[in-house]
């Protein structure tokens, strides 16, 4: 199961987020048909976890203002949460048919999320919400287009063919990768601003 890493991954900055996807594979039409229903246990668990996550993010924000970086416990929690959400998003976007692990377990899965936290600029931490507005606006538009247009068509294609065409897989992977970078930036896991939808 080959994971598609960005071609320049060896030259990434120390503070970075990389998301790699295995290429399109055969998918069980029944799981494609019932994908949202199958994901309900994840939705329930994330609904519970999001409360703790918001507390951790606020605590991490105050800590980063003073230390210039997240503490190791906060980083560990947020990296695990970030990986969990990225895998679930890939499953919901039909990028993989393999059911994602619940929680922070780092198992063999066709989506790899590598987070390399580093030093944070305290001023950028202070104004993180303001700085993130342009990226968040792009993310809102992107999610709206995915949900309203792209995914209904993709769902019909995968349901008919039993797999996602390569060009469509690459386009949706790029969108999911961008959303993962926006989340990582918001959660102070990286100082690298999420520029460019198709940036590696």
Image (cartoon, rainbow, N blue to C red):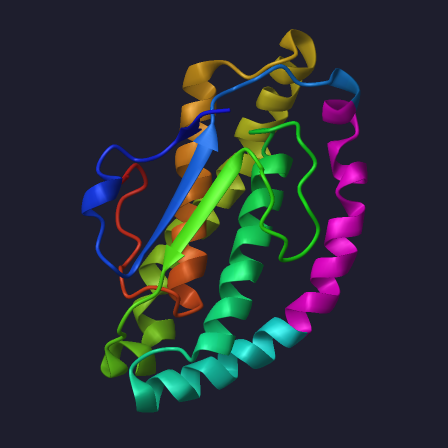
Quadrant position of residue 89: top right
Which residue shows up at 68% across the image and 46% down it? 101
Is residue 19 shown in magenta?
no
Query: Measured from the top left, where is residue 108 in percent x and y?
Result: 58, 38
Image: 178 above or below 61 = above
Is residue 40 shown in magenta?
yes
Q: Is residue 74 left or right of residue 9?
A: right
Image: 6 above or below 69 = above
Which residue shows up at 34% across the image and 65% down it? 117
Q: Main secondary structure of the magenta part?
A: helix
- Label tally: 0
Quarter of the rendering occupied by the C terminus = top left
Query: Measured from the top left, where is residue 12 in percent x and y?
Result: 22, 49
Image: 137 above or below 122 = above
Query: Measured from the top left, where is residue 177 in percent x and y?
Result: 41, 42
Query: Measured from the top left, where is residue 154 in percent x and y?
Result: 58, 22
Which residue shows up at 41% across the image and 87% down it? 63
Q: Residue furthest top?
A: 161
Quadrant position of residue 166: top left
Q: Is residue 148 left or right of residue 185?
A: right
Image: 113 above or below 57 = above
What's the magenta region? 31-51
Q: Residue furthest left?
A: 11
Q: Is residue 149 left or right of residue 63?
A: right
């Amino acid at each position: 199961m080959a994971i598609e890493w960005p071609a320049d991954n060896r030259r990434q900055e120390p503070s970075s987020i990389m998301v790699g996807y295995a290429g399109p594979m055969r998918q069980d039409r029944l799981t494609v048909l019932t994908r949202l229903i199958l994901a309900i246990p994840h939705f329930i668990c994330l609904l519970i976890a999001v409360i703790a996550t918001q507390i951790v993010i606020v605590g991490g924000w105050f800590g980063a203002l003073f230390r210039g970086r997240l503490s190791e416990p906060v980083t560990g929690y947020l990296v695990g949460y970030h990986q969990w959400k990225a895998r679930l998003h890939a499953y919901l976007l039909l990028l993989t048919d393999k059911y994602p692990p619940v929680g922070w377990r780092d198992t063999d899965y066709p989506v790899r999320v590598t987070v390399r936290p580093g030093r944070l600029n305290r001023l950028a931490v202070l104004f993180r919400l303001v700085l993130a507005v342009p990226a968040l606006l792009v993310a809102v538009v992107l999610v709206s287009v995915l949900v309203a247009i792209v995914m209904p068509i993709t769902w019909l294609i995968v349901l008919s063919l039993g797999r996602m065409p390569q060009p469509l897989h690459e386009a949706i992977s790029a969108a999911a990768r961008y959303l993962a970078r926006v989340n990582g930036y918001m959660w102070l896991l990286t100082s690298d601003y999420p520029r460019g939808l198709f940036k590696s």
